[in-house]
Image: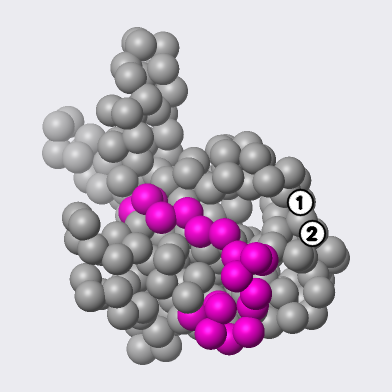
Amino acid sequence: MLRGLLVGMIKLAVFSAALLLIAVLASTLWFGRVAGALSEADAILVLGAGMKPDGTLDQATSARVMAGVALYEQGLAPVLMTSGGPAVVGGPTAGAQMARLAAAAGVPESALKAEEHSTSTLQNALFSAPILKAGGHERVIVVTEGFHMARAITSLRWAGVSVSGAHVSTMFRTGSSVRMLVREAIAWPFNLGRVAAWHIGILRGVPVEQRVLWLR
């Protein structure tokens, strides 16, 4: 009986993992298809993808920034905001490095904002939300890669950000598409668990400073 239960649990886990992969692939293709369907917004939010400890942006992060710059140049929003923290404690932040790249590409510094503390998608959302709200930026176009878009939008809406548009820098990441799809499928239940812990922490009176660490 125990063996049968174990086999059943393994089958359920495999089936669930397959469904997650299919869902991630479907969302990637969907957001790639609607990438051009945008209307004017209050801000463009570019999420970081990775950065070396010395502040060198990964190719994926640079591509996201340039996609955001292209939207800014099209006049889709008056503000371009970048989001990403340091790769190492005390090091340069992705948010600042991304903003520098955007400035070098021609975006005026007066149009740039940066969130510089996040180390995960959930923190991207949680830390960007008050900056956007303080600036009165109610309608936001989010820029990331296709495979990451659904989780990014879900995280931002959880944090209270009104996402009015989605633009993908690329649908998949060159040379690591399968790995990133698998990683993204794993990230969904992991994120749900962290969000659940966040809300349980609120009920138990856990300080926000500690709860924020759970979202890394």
Local SS, label 1: loop
Tell me if residue 59 comes above or below residue 153 in the rendering: below
Q: Quadrant of residue 103?
A: bottom right
Tell me if residue 74 comes above or below residue 183 in the rendering: below
In the image, is residue 109 part of the stretch drawn in magenta?
A: yes
- Specify the color scheme: one colour
**Residue at the image position 35 percent from the left and 57 percent from the top:** 85
State the residue in front, 64 or 24. Answer: 64
- Range of the magenta residues? 101-120
Q: Position of residue 147 (x, y in %)?
A: 51, 68
Q: Dots 1 and 2: beta carbons under 8 Å?
A: yes
Local SS, label 2: loop
Q: Amino acid at mark 1?
A: Arg
Q: Is residue 132 left or right of residue 93?
A: right
**Residue at the image position 58 percent from the left and 45 percent from the top:** 131
Tell me if residue 23 comes above or below residue 38 in the rendering: above
Q: Position of residue 212 (x, y in %)?
A: 35, 35
Q: Quadrant of residue 201?
A: top left
**Residue at the image position 53 percent from the left and 48 percent from the top:** 128
Q: Earlier in the sequence, mark 1 or mark 2?
A: 2
Q: Amino acid at mark 2?
A: Ala
Crowd tier of the residue under label 1, counting other residues whose Cα lies within 10 Å: few below 14, some 14–19, many 20 or above: some
Q: Position of residue 87 (x, y in %)?
A: 25, 63
Crowd tier of the residue under label 2, counting other residues whose Cα lies within 10 Å: few below 14, some 14–19, many 20 or above: some
Q: Which residue is mark 2?
A: 41
Q: Which residue is mark 1?
A: 139
State the residue in front, 144 or 57. Answer: 57
**Residue at the image position 47 percent from the left and 75 percent from the top:** 100
In which quadrant of the rendered image does the N terminus lie?
A: top left
**Disc 1 versus disc 2: distance between alpha carbons?**
5 Å
Q: Position of residue 60 (x, y in %)?
A: 43, 79
In the image, is residue 78 part of the stretch drawn in magenta?
A: no
